């Protein structure tokens, strides 16, 4: 499944970008990144788009959950990731765009799963499965309300969130289209088969009628 290379690239970009924002030390590679101060921002396109370092203990796009739900969320994400992988494996005969969509979703799921599972241990602030997801893309869009909370800016997100969102959109657009085309093809095939069957029956009936007529003519001549 070559689309898994895309999954790997998504995970790699996601984790490298988070490491650059949060900072940290990798002793084996002799790498140390200072990172950003929590809550600080770097303007990219003025106030419209910034890099802002925050950590999210809950769902994607800054949707928070309580401590009791955090372990359940991490385990659910792990199981969902495994499920997506097996679904991608079963869909290996699907169109490329569908497999690409699934690979993007899988990459995003793995990216955030790494944060939730290991970041607490790696950075020394929480046990396994209780880590926080690093978010940093901060964009200013129209005001909107989500789950009873009003936002004057789009919730801060990361590469993994973006990958999942793009994958879901592609899946909704193209998987539905593929199913529609497949259904139409089946209907066309069924219609063709039915038409062929009717034609064969008509030809068979005509042949029988001609045979009966010929037999009657032969009998008439003999008489």
Image (cartoon, rainbow, N blue to C red):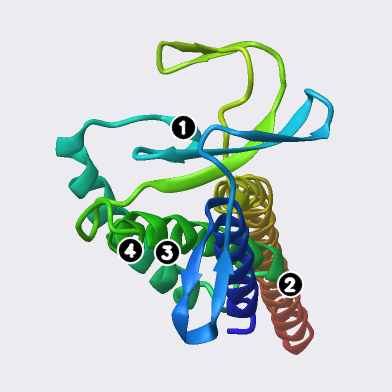
C-alpha distance separating marks 2 and 3: 52 Å
Q: Residue at x 58, y 75 (%)?
A: 8
Q: Earlier in the sequence, mark 4 or mark 1?
A: 1
Q: Earlier in the sequence, mark 4 or mark 2?
A: 4
Reading the image, the residue beneath label 2 is: 203
C-alpha distance separating marks 4 and 1: 19 Å
Q: Residues within 10 Å of mark 1 (few under 14, many from 20)?
A: some
- Give residue 164's position: percent from left, percent from top: 56, 51
Q: Residues within 10 Å of mark 3 (few under 14, many from 20)?
A: some
Between label 4 and label 1, give the one nearer the viewer: 4
Q: Residue at x 38, y 59 (%)?
A: 113
Between label 4 and label 2, give the one nearer the viewer: 4
Between label 2 and label 3, give the one nearer the viewer: 3
Q: Earlier in the sequence, mark 4 or mark 3?
A: 3
Q: Residue at x 22, y 61 (%)?
A: 128
Q: Nearer the viewer, residue 143 or 84?
A: 143
């Amino acid at each position: 499944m070559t689309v898994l290379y895309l999954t790997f690239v998504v995970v790699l970009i996601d984790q490298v970008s988070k490491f650059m924002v949060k900072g940290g030390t990798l002793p084996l590679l002799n790498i140390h990144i200072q990172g950003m101060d929590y809550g600080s921002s770097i303007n990219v396109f003025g106030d419209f788009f910034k890099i802002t370092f925050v950590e999210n203990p809950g769902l994607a796009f800054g949707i928070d959950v309580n401590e009791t739900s955090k372990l359940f969320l991490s385990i659910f994400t792990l199981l969902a990731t495994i499920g997506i992988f097996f679904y991608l494996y079963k869909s290996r005969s699907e169109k490329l765009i569908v497999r690409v969509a699934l690979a993007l979703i899988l990459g995003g799921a793995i990216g955030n799963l790494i944060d939730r599972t290991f970041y607490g241990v790696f950075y020394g602030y929480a046990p396994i499965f209780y880590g926080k997801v690093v978010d940093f893309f901060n964009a200013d869009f129209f005001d909107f309300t989500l789950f009873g909370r009003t936002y004057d800016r789009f919730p801060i997100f990361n590469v993994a969130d973006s990958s999942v969102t793009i994958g879901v959109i592609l899946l909704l657009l193209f998987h539905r289209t593929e199913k529609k085309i497949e259904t139409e093809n089946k209907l066309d095939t069924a219609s063709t088969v039915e038409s062929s069957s009717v034609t064969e029956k008509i030809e068979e009936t005509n042949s029988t009628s001609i045979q009966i007529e010929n037999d009657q003519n032969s009998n008439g001549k003999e008489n």
